Amino acid sequence: MTRMYHSLPVSAYTDQDWFDREQRLIFSRSWRFAGLVEDIPEPGHYISVQAGLNNIFIVMGRDHRLRAFHNICRHRGTQLIRAVGKTQKALTCPYHDWTYDLEGNLISVPDEEREYPGGLDKSCLGLKPASVDIWRGMLFVHPDPKAPSLVDWFGPVDPLLGPHQPQELVEYEEARNSYEIRANWKIVVENYIDVYHLSHLHSNTLHMYDHAAAEYGWKGPHYHFWEPPAAAYAKNLEQNLPTPRVIPEPHVGAWVPMLFPGIGIGASEDSWNLFIITPLAPDLTRVENRTKLANVSSWAYSKQAWRSHGFWRSFGGPKYSGQDAAGADDPMASGDFTAEDIYACEQQQKSLTSPFLEIGPAANGESPITNHQAAILDFMAAQEALDR
Ligand code: FES
Ligand SMILES: [Fe+2]
């Protein structure tokens, strides 16, 4: 008998076969976050990203246009460029020095006459294009050069994501980080969209928002979520915000959508955060965080920090302390909601291989989890239908 985790088999969280199918049918056939527009400021700058089975890079051409290409040399397939960088005019493959211009055309082949005495039609050997598009200051790539636009993909959910304009904010570099979680990527998504856990796992770390008043739902495979500040936080909200506002008054609350597949955003009155989920193995997931804050003076930041200091000094702390804490490095005693989430995800993954695992009934606040599982099944079924 197949053991189930709500509407997916438990093997969807543990088996290489499922992982490979998701890589092929989901991550190779959807828009992948690649970076922020400011990551490619000038002609010759590039970044690359793994989109399922495809490595794709975006480069700015001499005409200041962004183009995306599959990172595959047309000679013997070597990856052309490294992760992030800048070139002057051309992209040269390290293996035999075939060289392409910033627009993807093959422009030079070493020893061409001697090595290809019959001639070589370089015009048919340009880099294979992929799609690139920009949405809310973010760069996305799609392996298919004819992919429908991001407006089509995110358009229906866009009005529910908050009034933030990330392109007008500045990155807080110290908050940029990347870490691995020993759990399947869907466990990480399910944790992110689990409304039920907010008041429990994070009873002392996210209680500045009123989880009971959360409004959430779906637009296609994309999840949207908003919740208002809790009474204690809202009472003197302008004073209590730890950093200056990024959205105009009277907008308040936290918008925490999870766009498909695995593109989390966490935006509030005073910050805008990215939470990009990348599956690495059935039981291993990478998360990349980037944070943007208000583009105002350091004096404005200092002033807001002083104003809010009194509130934060007496608000929040660890879930477990004293005898309940398992030592100084217990994530449940950290007072850090991310550490709490990672701990819960890893502890859950550990049980998935036990023959005694039997998943209990889903609570109301867990309906996003079963919805996400349905979105996974629907997306894969639609892609498999296209292949037939
Ligand atoms: S594989 Fe790139 S030049 Fe040979
Ligand atoms: Fe959480």
Image (spheres, helix red, strand yellow):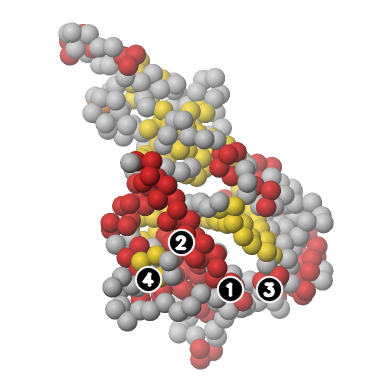
Distance from the alpha carbon under mark 2 to that under mark 3: 23 Å
Q: Nearer the viewer, mark 2 or mark 3?
A: 2
Label 2 belongs to which residue? 373
Distance from the alpha carbon under mark 1 to that under mark 4: 19 Å
Q: Report x, y in % for residue 149.
A: 55, 35
Q: Report x, y in % for residue 53.
A: 34, 43
Q: Is residue 370 above or below residue 248?
A: below
> Considering only order in the chain, which callout, 1 or 3, is on the residue closer to the N terminus?
3
> Considering only order in the chain, which callout, 4 or 3, is on the residue closer to the N terminus?
4
Q: Which residue: 36% across, 66% down?
A: 9
> Closest to the observer: 162 or 63?
162
> Closest to the observer: 113 or 350?
350
**Badge number at residue 364:** 1
Q: Which residue: 69% across, 45% down?
A: 165
Q: Secondary structure at mark 1?
A: helix
**Label 4 is placed on what type of residue?**
Met
Q: Secondary structure at mark 4?
A: strand
Judged from this view, the residue extending furthest toward the bottom is 323
Q: Which residue: 68% across, 64% down?
A: 215
Q: Which residue: 32% across, 57% down?
A: 18
> Considering only order in the chain, which callout, 3 or 2, is on the residue closer to the N terminus?
3
Label 4 belongs to which residue? 4
Image quadrant containing the C terminus: top left
Distance from the alpha carbon under mark 1 to that under mark 2: 15 Å
Q: Is residue 190 visible?
A: yes
**Label 3 is placed on what type of residue?**
Ala
Label 3 belongs to which residue? 212
**Label 2 is placed on what type of residue?**
Gln
Mark 2 and mark 3 in contact? Answer it, CB < 8 Å: no
> Considering only order in the chain, which callout, 2 or 1, is on the residue closer to the N terminus?
1
